[in-house]
Amino acid sequence: MRRSKVILFTILILFIGGFAFTVSGCGKSQDKGKIGKARDVYYCPMHPTYTSDRPGDCPICNMKFVKKEAEREKPIKNDGHKGHEIAAQGAPAEEKTFEEVCIEHSCTMNNCPMLVRATIKPGERVLCPVCGEVISTTSGKVVEIGKKPAAGPTGPTVMISPEKQQLIGVTTGPVGRRELEKTIRASGRIAYDPELVVTQEEFIQAINNEEKIKDSPLQYVIDRAKSLTSAARQKLRLLGMSEEQILSLEKTRKSETTLYLPGKGESVWAYISIYEYEIGLISIGQPVEIEAVAYPRDVFKGTVMAINPVLDPMTRTNQARVEVKNEENKLKPEMFVKARIKISLGEKLAVPETAILDTGIRKIVYVSRENGMLESRDIKTGLKVDGYYEVLEGLDEGDIVVTSGNFLIDSESRLKSAAAGEAGHKQHGQ
């Protein structure tokens, strides 16, 4: 009898324990279901930082809210030894380094500890201080210490599915090297400059006078003659003549009469105005094409002979003197002309103008990666030529950049940055 009671009591305990375990398991699965179900978020396409939990209109611009699609989660693998393997395959005798980011906690807020960057050396394991995961390589590229690393993201990374990219009209193109040739266009006039002719005559007379009295016993007379020559030479420089032209004038002792009355078949001078930001591209000896309003079908050939050393503070332009062939005596003093100067910049790394978002302070491009990942990069550009910008910093040859749809991607990036910032503040506040 006692043995039957013990068996019955044991069965009862096992039944109660199994029932309690089943109930607790169901409760956890229900809790997980509740946690996994995220509420819908709506945002304004023009003001992505303004979000709502229900459809409606933006109170700022009255545009309809758009539902934010849920992001596809990308699993983070613990590749603690992956960095060591890549380093070992490279050159084990030399020290290698990886520039890494923990993808799971890439916070875009300034000074937020959730943005993790680490330098991993061979055999070293670095843990993310936020999630505790081993920071793994994101690109698999080995960068030697002391060498310039490849360009990387300088802003938030946004994930947009390839389907959505196609829907909003995103197109991409590679960054490559191409021959750049810039054409500088300037306006000007055919020279009528009696003042310069008079100054040239004064300079010639000063030189002749200095030579005549060089054997004078009176030193102050010699010094006075030299000072007059020096003053006339300086005035020619201020009027825009180059040192080569002054030396030529000193040798020939013949002033340029074409500056006020060009003879038949003689060359004339044209004064063209170059904008301040283009002055660095102009040099003496460059060929120039001149067009006159009076002769629209004719193109006159010229050469840059001198560049004025003083900038015009009112127009922010610099004057270049061009010697123009005038064989048929068509060009007359004070005629308005247009000038073209073609300058070859050589082979440069270039990116399409449409790929750049210019904020006025920064120039941003989005680089396309695998699985719909788009990296924000700050770049430094040089000259703009025929729809392309010269790239000085921020991109490497072969990078795939977004060439259209940048504004929508930037809007999505700002939205996700704002959402991440809001979530980060909530976590810090808990």
Image (spheres, rainbow, N blue to C red):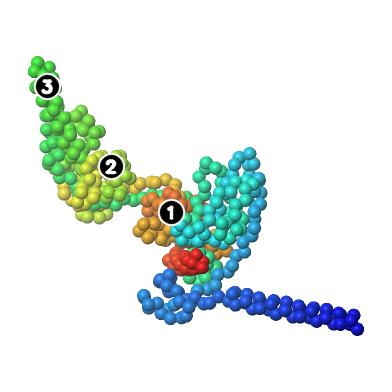
Tag 2: amino acid: Thr
Q: Nearer the viewer, mark 2 or mark 3?
A: 3
Label 1 vs 3, first from the N-terminus? 3
The location of residue 78, given as percent across then percent down, is 64, 58
Mark pair 2, 3: CA separation:
39 Å
Farthest residue to the bottom: give it. 1
Q: Mark 2 points at which residue?
A: 303
Label 1 vs 2, first from the N-terminus? 2
Tag 1: amino acid: Ile
Q: Which of marks 1 and 2 is in front?
A: 1
Q: Which of 207 and 74 is in front in this view?
A: 74
Residue drawn at the location 9% of the way across and 21% of the way down: 220
Relative to residue 346, is residue 13 drawn left or right?
A: right
Report crowding for label 2: few under 14, some 14 to 19, many 20 or more residues within 10 A (C-alpha).
many
Residue 93 — which label? none
The location of residue 184, given as percent across then percent down, is 31, 50
